[in-house]
Image (spheres, rainbow, N blue to C red):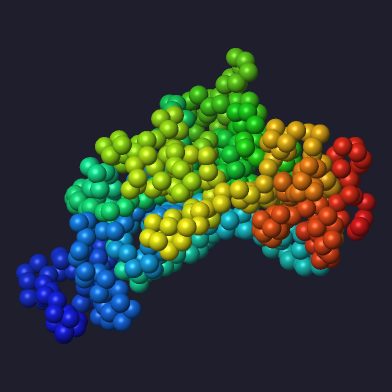
């Protein structure tokens, strides 16, 4: 490495760790910063390149030469605040385009003391562990079904929470490591510090020991995401947990009260009940606000039939600890949202899932003039994700009026980097973004909810086709008929264009993903009718939809179709 720099005519400062008194301490700090335990440990203009092999790879790819060109007035071309889905996507794309990039990522521990590694909410405390726990619950259902299919087993089957969480956390750790490796390979500087703007083009980075470092950049991207909201009542932060804590909880939560009716609330309640736990959901008003309400009620109804209890129109007013333990015992006092009635209950765990707040208020945005929505904390941006300050952009869940979904953040982050550095003019398309709620019976959707479609297009201009269906896998297993449901909303004024797609059934995510691509291509009812279904599948019901809501005809199913 020394010879390489010498041949390039570059002066380099060399610190021989075995020749200095505090070499071991320096090595320890280097290892913490870079996750590299070997030497040489090479930095070029504050960017960690890696060891010998990585330095030569950077030289061969031309990256090293770019890093050595110090013709900028700033330390970096781009600094990204937040190492979640959107931030990492943007960082990697900018680095591929040859830019000098830094990612600042710091997880402020939850009130219960939970923190995690690089990758953001989705990987650590969101989509990934959620889907794995959902799968664990589905396997429990599959075990029950298997007896009807001839599988015989005598032993009592029970679920082990610790075994599951350990396996899931091991997988997450491997993903964290993969992200760090990916950044290192692309010569992106990763700093595990809290970023806060101090003046134009300048940010302060504070590490967990309180040490402060200052960096400057030509461009900034805010990708700080959101964290769970608390109730603001006595005992909430002391005794309640949130999704930040649940997936790494070292003990089984036992009898659980889930507060909230968000998709996070219903997904968590669903898989906890699937493990055989006593679960109650306390709902202030409606289920799944923002989603199609007919579908939302069907989701709730299925959960209720499968053992989840719902307390409607109640909100907690106080949480008291009755016993310490793992889990302990908590008393919850709640009041009606419609009258003076109060109720109380005793639970082992109280999980709050009442919404999330944007992490935008304590990062110094006011010092550089970035406007935020004071009520929501969201950042208003234009159609190229630019904030009120031209050199500052934002991506992900903190954007005002945009879907709060990982793939959206990834797409918008990647396209933003390409636009910032001249590789493309393409903007992120936020229309017809598909999503799935991983409740025990999954709900997938793309496009408009029925209520929204009526509001936008008027009821008389819509035709809604729907049907109940019975998955073949459920028949022999003796599971309910006329529970799964499919619905499409068509615009009569535009060739019966499909503007809303909704499915409640097994593997709804897999089904919805395919139809989302079709909707991107301008799917119409006629195109669905012209499509030959794959038999026997759930998705094929969309190719044979005949009954409209306006006809008032019965949609219950009697056979195979």
Visible residue check, residue 27: yes
Give the mark count: 0
What residue is drawn where x is 43% and y is 57%? 419
Task: Looking at the picture, tell me which residue is in the foreground, 256 or 336.
Answer: 336
What residue is drawn where x is 76% and y is 49%? 497
What quarter of the picture does the N terminus occupy?
bottom left
Task: Give the side of residue 166 with respect to residue 306, left or right.
Answer: left
What residue is drawn where x is 77% and y is 46%? 494
Visible residue check, residue 32: no
Query: Residue 244, how many percent across, how many down?
Result: 45, 46
Residue 268, relative to residue 66: is it above or below?
Answer: above
What residue is drawn where x is 7% and y is 76%? 19
Task: Give the side of residue 511 with respect to residue 81, left or right.
Answer: right
Task: Give the side of residue 446 with respect to residue 323, left or right.
Answer: right
Query: Residue 63, how many percent across, how many down?
Result: 30, 73
Question: Based on the displayed image, in which of its 4 quarters is residue 20 positioned?
Answer: bottom left
Query: Residue 276, how many percent across, how many down?
Result: 64, 49
The residue most toward the top is: 340
Task: Looking at the picture, tell me which residue is in the foreground, 65 or 129.
Answer: 65
Query: Residue 485, how many percent across, how many down?
Result: 79, 48
Task: Looking at the picture, tell me which residue is in the foreground, 515 or 298.
Answer: 515
Task: Looking at the picture, tell me which residue is in the foreground, 456 or 252.
Answer: 456
């Amino acid at each position: 490495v020394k010879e390489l720099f010498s041949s390039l005519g570059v002066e380099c400062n060399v610190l021989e760790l075995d020749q200095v008194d505090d070499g071991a301490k320096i090595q320890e700090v280097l290892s913490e910063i870079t996750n590299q335990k070997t030497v040489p440990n090479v930095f070029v203009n504050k960017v960690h390149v890696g060891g010998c092999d990585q330095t030569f790879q950077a030289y061969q790819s031309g990256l090293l030469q770019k890093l050595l060109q110090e013709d900028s007035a700033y330390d970096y071309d781009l600094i990204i605040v937040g190492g979640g889905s959107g931030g990492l996507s943007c960082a990697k794309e900018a680095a591929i385009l040859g830019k000098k990039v830094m990612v600042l990522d710091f997880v402020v521990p939850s009130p219960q003391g939970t923190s995690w590694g690089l990758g953001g909410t989705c990987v650590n405390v969101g989509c990934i562990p959620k889907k794995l726990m959902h799968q664990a619950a589905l396997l429990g259902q599959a075990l029950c079904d298997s007896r009807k299919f001839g599988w015989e087993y005598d032993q009592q089957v029970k679920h082990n929470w610790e075994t599951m969480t350990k396996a899931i956390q091991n997988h997450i750790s491997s993903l964290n490591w993969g992200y760090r490796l990916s950044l290192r390979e692309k010569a992106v500087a990763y700093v595990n510090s809290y970023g806060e703007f101090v003046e134009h083009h300048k940010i302060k980075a504070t590490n967990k020991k309180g040490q402060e470092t200052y960096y400057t950049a030509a461009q900034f991207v805010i990708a700080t995401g959101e964290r769970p909201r608390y109730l603001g009542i006595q005992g909430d932060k002391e005794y309640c947990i949130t999704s930040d804590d649940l997936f790494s909880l070292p003990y089984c939560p036992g009898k659980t009260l889930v507060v909230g009716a968000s998709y996070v609330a219903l997904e968590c309640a669903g898989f906890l009940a699937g493990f055989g736990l006593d679960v109650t959901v306390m709902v202030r008003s409606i289920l799944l606000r923002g989603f199609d309400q007919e579908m939302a009620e069907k989701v709730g109804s299925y959960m209720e039939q499968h053992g989840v209890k719902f307390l409607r129109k109640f909100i907690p007013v106080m949480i008291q600890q009755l016993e310490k333990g793992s889990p302990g015992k908590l008393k919850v006092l709640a009041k009606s949202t419609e009258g003076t009635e109060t109720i109380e209950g005793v639970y082992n765990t109280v999980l709050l899932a009442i919404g999330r707040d944007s992490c935008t208020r304590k990062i110094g945005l006011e010092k550089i003039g970035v406007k935020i929505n004071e009520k929501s904390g969201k950042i208003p941006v234009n159609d190229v994700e630019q904030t009120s300050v031209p050199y500052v952009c934002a991506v992900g869940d903190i954007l005002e009026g945009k879907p709060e979904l990982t793939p959206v953040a990834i797409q918008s982050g990647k396209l933003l980097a390409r636009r910032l550095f001249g590789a493309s003019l393409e903007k992120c398309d936020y229309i017809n973004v598909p999503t799935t709620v991983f409740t025990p019976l999954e709900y997938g959707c793309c496009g408009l909810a029925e209520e929204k479609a009526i509001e936008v297009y008027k009821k008389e201009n819509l035709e809604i086709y729907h049907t109940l269906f019975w998955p073949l896998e459920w028949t022999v297993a003796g599971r309910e008929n006329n529970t799964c449901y499919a619905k499409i909303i068509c615009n009569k004024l535009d060739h019966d264009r499909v503007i809303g797609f909704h499915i409640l059934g097994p593997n709804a995510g897999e089904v919805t993903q395919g139809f989302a691509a079709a909707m991107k291509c301008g799917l119409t009812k006629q195109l669905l009718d012209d499509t030959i279904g794959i038999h026997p599948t759930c998705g094929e019901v969309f190719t044979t939809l005949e009954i409209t809501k306006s006809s008032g005809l019965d949609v219950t199913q009697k056979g195979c179709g």
